[in-house]
Amino acid sequence: MITPSTTIRQAPAWQHALRDAFSRPAELLDFLGLDPALPVLDAERLRDFGLRVPRGFAERMRKGDPDDPLFLQVWPRGAEAYAVDGFGLDAVGDMAKLKPGGIVHKYHGRVLVMTTGACGVHCRYCFRRHFPYSEALAARDHWSEALAQIEADESIHEVILSGGDPLSLSDDKLGEFLDGLDRIAHVRRLRIHTRQIVVLPERVDDSLIERLSRTRLATVIVLHANHANELDTAVAEACARLRAIGVTLLNQAVLLRRINDDAAALRALSERLFACGVLPYYLHLLDRVAGSAHFEVDEASALALMRELSAQLPGYLVPKLARESAGEASKRVLA
Ligand SMILES: *Cc1c(COP(=O)(O)O)cnc(C)c1O
Ligand code: SF4
């Protein structure tokens, strides 16, 4: 899954850590001291979207607790196989909007670029499992189609790298794209949507810092953490390095049943993010994709949670509750 470096030199430490991630359910259970008979999704479905958990992330889980909020995000439960009304394959309508070059241009002034299908972790609630990545990935042709499309549209001021996880690409591959974007005068901002910094903080190494400090683009990184326990010292240090080179750090979380659907958990997340130099941005209602229904929190409960949160935190630590919806000019902000 990892793009090999184009030059001959040793693979960076983060790539070793990725390769070393847990991929066998039995090994993860053993590591966590959990019952080896804990039910798991059938092997056939697991072949499509397997278990993947970096060891460093597993180390942040509580041993012996099958209800740990980090474990619940990555454990493939049998419930993923249930068909539930309203949960389909393209919940947010992005597949229909995907253009050649891996570009999704839904909102004014900014485009989303599907850079790669690979991720450092497999989050069980994610839409990514159903995305036809084989069809349109921006990195495939050395970014030439994506860059041509961005260059041709002067209304584009911000380019958002998404996926998959853009930081599962090598720095060479990423650097190629940044070089191209740097040359397009109407592009002012670079945004990277990534979970890698949270699940694999080793990713923020000297090479990445060097490359990001070289771009002329104002850079925003939107992390994805759903629970305060995800943000350990190593993550805080990675965030500090990025802040030191002037990167703006934001976080998006997904509201997930039994994981962060109470005011105390959300408050702790916001407080911990701020301590790491990150501001909460969006709290997303779940995209209704097949296999994720057991994670859903209904809208009325979500709104009640937001009221509690607003009563307990300064405004800048309250994320915007948002729902991705097809065919609108922006994400729909509910609170
Ligand atoms: C979420 C998203 C964006 C970014 O929206 P912001 O509200 O600016 O964070 C851009 N394009 C697409 C297709 C998106 O889904
Ligand atoms: S795209 Fe993000 S949320 Fe989805 S599996 Fe990858 S890291 Fe997890």
Image: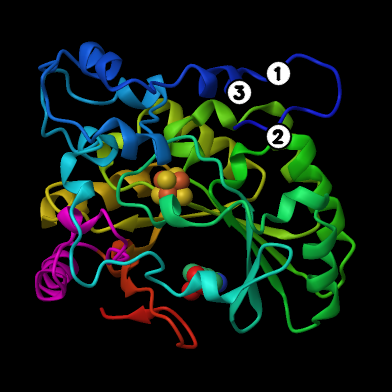
Query: Quadrant of the rendered structure where residue 321 is?
Result: bottom left
Residue lying at 38% horizontally and 64% vertically, measured from the top left: 89
Q: Are marks 3 and 2 in contact (CB under 8 Å)?
A: yes
Q: Are marks 1 and 3 in contact (CB under 8 Å)?
A: yes
Residue lying at 33% horizontally and 74% vertically, measured from the top left: 323
Q: Tell me the amino acid under the disc marked 1.
A: Ala
Can you give x and y, in whole percent of width and height, for residue 250 in the image?
47, 56
**Inter-mark Cα distance, 2 to 1:** 9 Å
Circle 3: is it few (<14), some (14-19), or many (20+) Cα within 10 Å?
some
Taking the image as shown, residue 220 lies to the left or right of residue 265, namely: right
Query: Quadrant of the rendered structure where residue 216 is?
Result: bottom right
Q: Tell me the amino acid under the disc marked 2.
A: Ser
Residue lying at 72% horizontally and 68% vertically, measured from the top left: 100
Taking the image as shown, residue 38 lies to the left or right of residue 233, namely: left
Residue 311 lies within the magenta run: yes
Taking the image as shown, residue 280 lies to the left or right of residue 39, namely: right
Which residue occupies the extreme front position in the image? Answer: 44
**Magenta segment:** 284-313
- The residue tagged 3 is 15
Q: Which mark, residue 170?
A: 2
Which of marks 2 and 3 precedes in the sequence?
3
Query: Quadrant of the rendered structure where residue 109 is?
Result: bottom right
Taking the image as shown, residue 149 lies to the left or right of residue 326, namely: right
| Residue nearest the viewer, comparing 182 with 300 | 300
